[in-house]
Image (tube, helix red, strand yellow):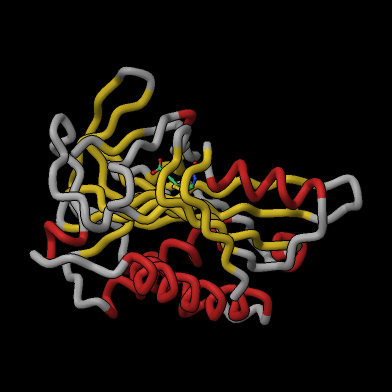
Amino acid sequence: MNIIKLSAINSTNDYLKELSSTRHVENFTIAVAEHQTQGRGQMGTQWETQQGKNLTFSVLVKDLLLEINAIFYLNAAVAVSVIDALEMFNISGLSIKWPNDILAGNKKLGGILIENNIRSNGEIHSVVGIGINVNQTDFEGLPKATSLALVAEREFDKNAVMVAIAENLKRNLSLLLHKDADALWDKYLQQLYKKNIPMPFEKEGMRFMGIIKGVSKNGSLEVQLEDDNIVFYKVKEVQLLY
Ligand code: BTN
């Protein structure tokens, strides 16, 4: 594994994106930072973590999107790889909050930000950014955040956690390349947070009750409404309130 270790950087996603736009970077290169000054989350949010305590890294995946049937398979593969790796460290109660938040119980343990770029030479670069709260134990003002250390009541070796995630990811991406995504997809659906449980949702300021039934291959959330109608919501269109 080609791993670039950085002490401080704006964002490992931005770093890998810039690096791979200016020179040849091997497929599956990983950039990991002790500290990000402008870490980014989904939907334009910031991703701030205590310096040195947590995992913030990105993996460059080249041209996979040319090969797979559904772009959302990449999201599912990353989320499942994280869950599988954390289970290897005996972390229980893990789930995936659609589309790809990693939860322990009902608190957020980590997040995933995947950004795809088409390069002028026709290559498609997917930068898979992963942030996992590892050894941080104080989340003042963030009541819905947790860490491996809080869940397991011990410290973790961040590098060992990253290597386990990266190894799972490599294996799962090769399943995708060989069009063998069924088991991966099943695991993604199995791990879905609050599946089959009536839950409150919000869409454009309106609240309603619904039951998550699954996710379509293009990443839309399948929700059964109170009148039994089934609706598919795109990412960003609806929010599960919990
Ligand atoms: C989210 O849940 O909102 C996604 C968070 C993703 C954070 C990671 S940390 C490494 C990589 N670099 C970034 O700037 N963001 C991602």
> Is residue 203 placed above or below 217 in the rendered structure?
above
Relative image position of residue 72 (x, y in whole percent): 56, 56
Placement of the N terminus among the 4 image quadrants:
bottom right
Q: Residue furthest left?
A: 153
Q: Is residue 235 above or below residue 68?
A: above
**Relative to 32, residue 86 above or below:** below
Q: Quadrant of residue 117?
A: top right
- Furthest toward the top, the residue is 205
Q: Taking the image as drawn, is residue 100 in sight?
A: no
Please give the name of the residue rendered at 54% of the width and 80% of the height, measured from the top-left corner.
Answer: 171
Point out the quarter of the image occupied by ligand 1. Answer: top left
* Image location (x, y in percent) of residue 227: 27, 38
Q: For residue 138, say whether it is visible.
A: yes
Report the side of 104 relative to 49 (left or right). left
Q: Is residue 111 left or right of residue 120?
A: left
Give coordinates of residue 185: x percent, y percent.
Answer: 47, 70
Q: Observer-nearest residue: 235 or 57? A: 57
Out of 169 and 36, give the one closest to the viewer: 36
Observer-nearest residue: 110 or 33?
33
* Quadrant that contains the C terminus: top left
* Image spot of residue 17 (x, y percent): 68, 46
Q: Which residue is nearer to you in this view: 1 or 175?
A: 1
Q: In the rendered view, does 49 fall on the left or right side of 17?
A: left
Q: Which residue is rendered at x = 13% and y = 33% of the image? A: 140
